[in-house]
Image (cartoon, grey):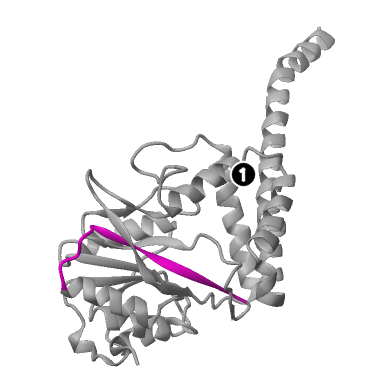
Amino acid sequence: MNPAATSPRSAAPDNCVVVLLTFNSAGIIRETATAALRVSPHVYAVDSGSNDGTVQILQELGCTVVQRPFTNYSDQRNWAIAQVQASHEWQLHLDADEVLDDTCVGEIRALLHGAAGHDAYMLRRRDYFMGRMLRFSGVNPWHLRLFRSGAGRCEARLYDQHFILVGAARSSARLRGFMHDKNALSLSDWITRHNRWSDSEAREKSGPQALGDDVLQPRLLGDARERTRFIKQLYYRLPIGLRAIGYFLYRYFLRLGFLDGRPGFYFAFFQALWFRMLVDAKLYEMRMATDDNSTSEVNAPCANTTRQNASS
């Protein structure tokens, strides 16, 4: 048995705080918080008005809970960073349904007890869908979640936000363990949430693309997250509509999603042929509305002149 699995909470390092974002997460939050408490006795949950018992479970486990209305992911994360950075050397950020495995807990504890060689560490995420772990079908596996206070922040984006390093000469490394994204949502809730996210993605892609130090930049030779963003940049240069079909073929066949059985098919279908196609449809809708408005503005003076001449 992994020693980290049986180590008492009191032996957890005291120089780190685990930050959780929660909203109506009662079905999974006990498992998430229990694993987090093995990393640090300090768990700081920013709740957005849960009414399903989430807060009571966290308080029962000894976590600190603060209430703050949710505007967007980046705003909530960066607000939480500012609240805890003065009192803790390290910060670990998790979503309400992200559960650390024994290997990940042991690695983080060892880093916090020893002399960490880097300013930040990326955790490997393993996706779940319809109650099943996806071995092949998951997306965006690497996420920077553990960093020294002052060394990280969440990038200012509407969708697909990542934590980024702040300041020059910062370095990061990977951990071997997994962060299990257990996705406690029903399929209906998953679709509702992704429909909302498709609005954010369409708005993000229809406007000017952010540059500079506030966002993760696409780099072919960068880390795993930067390469993914580079590939996504190429994806959006493909013909609208057809790119979603190509993405499905990539996820289901080239990435061996079919080996995840029926949940793997449904995940590839909804992630690519539904969600990505929905983003494309909304981008098309936005462009059509812009073209219609431009046409109306061009024709408006002619229409006014015609009415004036008719009445003269």
Answer with the quarter of the image where residue 144 lies.
bottom left
Whether 48 is drawn above or below 154: the answer is below
Residue at 60% x, 46% y: name it. 202
Magenta span dominant secondary structure? strand
Tell me residue 201's x, y (percent). Answer: 57, 49
Answer with the quarter of the image where residue 58 lies.
bottom left
Q: Which residue is mark 1?
A: 235
Label 1 Cα crowd, 10 Å radius (few <14 / some 14-19 / many 20+):
some
Residue at 57% x, 75% y: name it. 185
Whether 171 is drawn above or below 59: the answer is above
- Which stretch is magenta? 114-129
Answer with the quarter of the image where residue 295 lies.
top right
Tell me residue 105's x, y (percent). Answer: 32, 78
- Give the SS element for disc 1: helix
Q: Is residue 219 visible?
A: yes
Whether 38 is drawn above or below 122: the answer is below
Tell me residue 282's x, y (percent). Answer: 68, 46
Indicate whether residue 119 is drawn in magenta.
yes
Q: Nearer the viewer, residue 249 or 16?
A: 249
Indicate whether residue 154 is drawn in magenta.
no
* Amino acid under disc 1: Tyr
Is residue 38 found left or right of 276 in the rendered image?
Answer: left
